[in-house]
Image: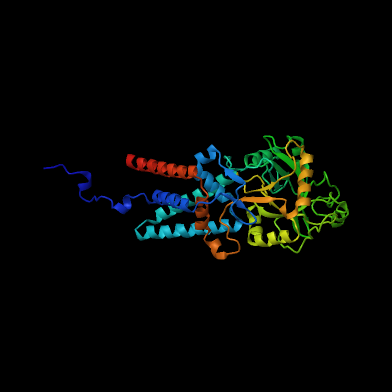
Amino acid sequence: MPKQTSNDEPGRQRPSLRRRIPWIPALITLAVVISSAAAVRPVRDAATMQEISEAFLVRPIGYVAIAPFSNVFDLITLLSVRQHIAMFLGLIVLFTAWRITRAIRGASGRSHVKATAIAFVAFVLTYVTAVLLPRPMAYLVSQDANVIRVDFHSHTSGSKDAAGWFSVERNRDWHRNGGYDAAFITDHATVAAAERGLVGNPRAGLDSVVLLQGIEATWAGEHIALLGAERTYKGLLTPNLRDVDPEAVNFASAVATREPVIVWNHAKALNKLPPASGPGTAGIRAMEISNGSPANMDKIRPKRAAIVAFANKYDLALTTGTDSHGWGRTAPNWTLMRPLRWRGLTGDELALRIERVIREGGFQATRVVERVVADPGASTFALALTVLAAPARMLTTLSTDERVMWLVWTWLVTAVVWWRARSR
């Protein structure tokens, strides 16, 4: 009589085909493959939201090697506050739906508690890792050697709301890894860190980043960046360096070709501040169209078209600001400019050259570039779909190498899980 196999033992049945298929890795594989049919460039023009050809995003080998983690951490860093909330609520809905199906199949209350605890810990660890863990950064490269990549709005530990460890040299290192040639240090109510950064400046266009002096202050309740504050221009702010002195700005702007360059950061109401109307006039000369702060993304994105129209009407330059406070390792945007013979300049010379381009070039002075993300704008429905839309948009921006690594990691983890289950 033939020996009975384990699958023929009384009370044991071979698992159904549905239970034997690794559905999660299969669905991830399907999503990675299908999304390649709708692939887009990972960077776009921040004003028109169209693809650009003069610059491209580079992912270093370390970034690609851990592509699933790099991409997810970048996704988290590039979400606005509203999107973070929508993502959290969406994950709760999906998790609840999953546990309901498990309950229908007889899952115990203990298993629900365990699954909830694991999900919560995984969520918190993912966010903490995205914000704090050092990792390779994707960076922007321009095909034109005459183009300079600038950040007009960044902070250091000199700003009270920034990370305590984000010194001016760590700011420089962050910008170098993100593909910038120059960055303005615009701390709140102080230029101390910016002054320290000037001491360590290389000549422009070398391996390191040139740090330039500015300050973030308020004017009629709006946030502005005053380029060259307390260096090229003094006495334009109140004694505590927190607010603009309009009369002082009017007086300083009377000298044509030397008017202070003021950038309007993450504008709230477009009727609050006066735009400059030409040489020898005071007012705003540039508008921020893309900001990397989660809170300020929600201020800019819904009125992107209005900001562009305003800047075009008054011939104002468009700029981007990472608004980096030391959290995360994702470069969100860049401003491309063509200052005349900028390579080899000192920091002060470069700052003056950048200001001149803005004054003379106006709306045509810059090209603003940002990472491609799911942008709900003012649509509540699109915002509600963040839990699906944000990952879907992320997948469409992957390079071929990243897609390969997604498949490698997916099935490697699946194989390890399968092996551990078999070993038990």
1 vs 237, left or right, is left
The residue nearer to you, when weighing 185 against 13, is 185
Q: Quadrant of residue 418?
A: top left
Quarter of the image where the C terminus is located: top left
- Residue at image point 40% right, 53% down: 111
The residue nearer to you, when weighing 190 against 233, is 233
Q: Could one spot residue 292 in this view of the protein?
A: no
Position of residue 298 measured from the top left corner of the image (x, y, whole percent)? 63, 58
288 vs 73, left or right, is right
Colour scheme of the picture: rainbow
Residue at the left extreme, as displayed:
1
Does 305 appear above or below 401? Answer: below
6 vs 322, left or right, is left
Q: Quadrant of residue 353?
A: top right
Q: Quadrant of residue 220?
A: bottom right
Position of residue 101 measured from the top left corner of the image (x, y, whole percent)? 38, 59
The residue nearer to you, when weighing 255 against 219, is 255
Q: Could one spot residue 182 in this view of the protein?
A: yes
Quarter of the image where the N terminus is located: top left
- Residue at image point 72% right, 58% down: 311
Position of residue 336 measured from the top left corner of the image (x, y, whole percent)? 68, 47
Position of residue 337 measured from the top left corner of the image (x, y, whole percent)? 70, 46
311 vs 40, left or right, is right
Does 185 appear above or below 272? Answer: above
Question: How many numbered markers are drawn?
Answer: 0
